[in-house]
Structure formats: structure tokens, C-alpha cells
Image: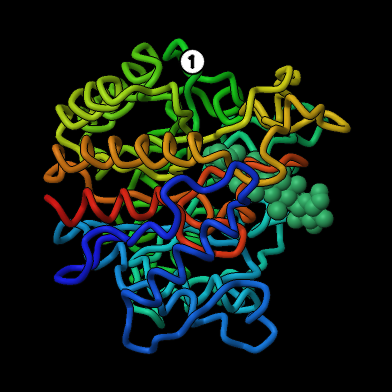
Amino acid sequence: MTVVGCCVEPVPVLSSPPKFATDSMRNDRRVFTKSLTAGVAGVWVTSDRWTSLGLVPAVAAAQTVALKDVVPKGWLIGVAINQNQSDGRDAVAVELVSRQFNAITPENLLKFQSLHPEPDRFTFDAQDRYVAFGLDRGMAVIGHTLVWHSQTPGWVWSGTDGGLADRATMLERMHTHIATVVGRYKGKIRGWDVVNEALNEDGTLRDSPWRRGIGDDYIAKAFEFAREADPEAELYYNDYNLATKPAKRAGAIRIIKELQQHGIRIDAVGEQGHWRLQSPTTTEIDEAITELRATGVKVMITELDVNLLPTVAAPRPALSTGTPQRRSLEPASPAANPYVNGLPDDVQQALARYYADAFRVFLRHRDAITRVTFWGVSDGDSWLNRGRMNHPLLWDRQRHPKPAFDEVTRVLMAR
Ligand code: G3I
């Protein structure tokens, strides 16, 4: 960790940590170093031993650098939180999120399925608490997501004859959903992922039930309805692999330009950022942001994580999801699950370098990038585990900052 004016580099306790050293041991040392550098409280904190003594908040508090204090002015640095966190049940995460971030995204709570499970029933309790969580902390509250082919209940698309609902019916259902949800959080939610993942990898429109039922203009309709419900809210198109698939990126640019040509408001495009150490490269990230920003809309990295696990045999993409699920088969072979005892140092350092390089590219485009959001608070919270043990984020399972956190803050502070 870089601490201004104090020791620039954490004093390495051990030049080359012994191989068997687990993550938490290394991080205990680092937290120890930090506490030293924090110096103030001289609190020596390591995870499990102190948790029961209610000293957990000291972990987050001991972190002298907060991402939200070192990002460029006006940038949103956010995190996706789950209901345990927005309901305040995960105290350590709440402390960490409040300390480090100035924006939140709901991992699942504002998806169609969670909000509007039946035609005449909306559920807003947990959702209201999510919005309050952010507003109470002066954070930008993001809405994810209004129109998606996944996590949308079947009744939305089914017609009276059990077949696909007709255009008018599906449009009316989309309008009711958006008007009710966006209307409820008018002036509270900063911006919405209005449409999520509408593209195939070749840049053509995904054959989703929304498109089959309404037609290609379902995207334009969704943006119109969102604008109508809250004229001040920012409106985003969100997708994945825009940095790795130029054809898909071209498809996203087509969507943006068509909306602009019809005078329909779109404020930004989100590249989700579910990346790997090998892909995308910094050149690909740079090219993608350069092309996307050329449309005149802002660019956001909306669901950043770096998957460190080998891809298991890709399961059939079920129509209802479309997004390939990286779930491991029972039981995950050791080869498919190599980091159950923590990350080897070389992988830990490779992850730190990858994140640092990515943030250097983001900084080169700081005037076009408005938000970077991590998809989960810490490794244990990540969707990328799915029966395996992944380490894709900046905090480990003890919510200790990883070398990747240090490298990212170092790059941000060095700008
Ligand atoms: O809520 C039910 C719970 O009642 C049930 O007991 C449990 C057991 O199956 O499932 C719970 O629902 C799970 C839900 O997450 C809430 O935890 C779903 O099975 C599970 O599929 C769902 O996964 C979410 C996934 O989207 C669904 O596609 C992940 O948490 C979430 O991180 C992920 O996020 C998506 C973004 O929205 C869009 N971009 C890709 C990203 C990763 O897939």
C-alpha cells in the first residue's frame, strides 16, 4: 500500500514468502505492516483471531487509502453488493464498502425476477433498503437492470395461448415495469442499465424473447420508457466482451448510434469487464474505449473482475440465460480448482499487475470514463466461485486487501 509521506512501500516482512504460505498469512503480514504504517491506532489485526472480539471494522479502518479518495475527480468507483450487504447483515463488507466506494450496483435485487415476480406483484422491501443503503452514505446508486433475457420471469413473455405474447402485450408489460420501478426511484437512482446483453458475439441482435415478441425496436422502446419515467436519470446500454470482440463492439456502437439518430437519450455504454489475465490485453482495452467513446457517450467498466480459474467444459448456454455460466462440474477436478489453499505468489502478483495495467488504460481515458465498478466486494462474494475457489477481486476472503489493491491505489495516486 502506498501511504503518502510515510513508507511508500510496505516493508516486506519476508523477502520471499515460503511457498506454503497461504493468502491470509501473507495478508496478515501485510495488515500488520499496514497497522504499523497506519501507526495511529497501532492496532495489530489479523482476521479470524480478532473477528470474535468485534475488532473486524479495524481491518477496513486500518486501510488508510480509500479508492474513492484517489480516483480522478468526478469518477465513480463502485461495487456490486448482495442483499446480505445492503441489508447490513455483513458488517465487515458494509464497513469496507462505505470506506472504499462512492457507488453501488445491486448484484441481483433490481432484476425483473426479483422485483416483479408476478404480473400484479412487485416486491420493493429489500430493494428500498438497497437504495437507502447508498443514499444514506452519499453514494451514487445504480440500477441494474430493466430489460434482460435472463432473470426475467416467464409470464413476461407468455401469451394467452401459451405461446409468445404479442408485441402490444409485451410492450405494455415492459412499460408497466419500467414506469413502476424507475418511477419509484426517481431522483434516487443515478442511472440505469436499461438494456443488458442484447448482442451476440458477432454483433447481431441476440434472439431474445423481447426481440421475438416486440421486434428489434424493443431496445429503443426501453430507453424511451425509462426517459419518460425519470427524465433526469442516466441511461446505459450494458454488455460483456465489448473489449475482446470487435464485431460485438461494432454491434454496441450500432445500438448507440441508432438511439442517437432517433433522438433517444443514452448517456453511457457499459463494458462489463469480466476479464482474464490473458484477455483482454491493455491494447484491446484501449482500442475498445477509444472506439466506444467516439460515439460521444461516456464509457463505464460496470462488472469488473478477473477470473483466475481454468475454464471448465463450457455448459450448453440455456436460452433463458444465454450468458455462458462458468459453473464447475461436480466435484471440480483439482486441475479445475487449483487455488483452494490460496493464490500462489506469482499469480497474486500477476493479478496485481493486470489490474494496475487496466487502471492505467482507464486513466488515459479519464475524461471519457465515468465509472468503474467491481462485481463483488471480495473473493468470497464473487459469482465466479460457483463451487470452486476463485480470487478475482481486490479483497480476499478475510476482506484483507490484496496486492492488487495496492497496485491499483499506487497507479491512481501516481497519476
Ligand atoms: O435467490 C435464489 C435463492 O432463493 C435460491 O435458494 C438460490 C439457489 O439456487 O438461488 C438464488 O438465486 C441465485 C441469484 O444469483 C441470487 O443469489 C441464482 O440461482 C443465480 O443464478 C444468480 O446468479 C446471478 C447471475 O447474474 C444470474 O445470471 C449472480 O449472482 C450475478 O452475479 C450475475 O450477474 C450477472 C449480471 O447481472 C450481468 N452480467 C453478467 C453477471 C454474471 O453472470
Q: Quadrant of residue 263?
A: top left
Q: Is residue 152 visible?
A: no
Residue shown at 45%/28% (left/top)?
Answer: 277
Percent of width and height locating residue 230: 34, 61
**Residue 400 left/right relative to 349:** right
Is residue 129 or residue 314 the one in the foreground?
Answer: 314
How many numbered markers are drawn? Answer: 1
Is residue 158 or residue 314 the one in the foreground?
Answer: 314
**Residue 318 left/right relative to 46:** right
Percent of width and height locating residue 116: 66, 57
Is residue 298 or residue 232 the one in the foreground?
Answer: 298
- Mark 1 surroundings within 10 Å by alpha-carbon count, few (fewer than 14), some (14 through 19), many (20 or more): some
Residue shown at 14%/61% (left/top)?
Answer: 73
Q: Quadrant of residue 7?
A: bottom left
In the picture shown, does residue 139 fall above or below 319?
below
**Residue 59 left/right relative to 74:** right
In the picture shown, does residue 392 fall above or below 405?
above
Q: Quadrant of the N terminus?
A: bottom left
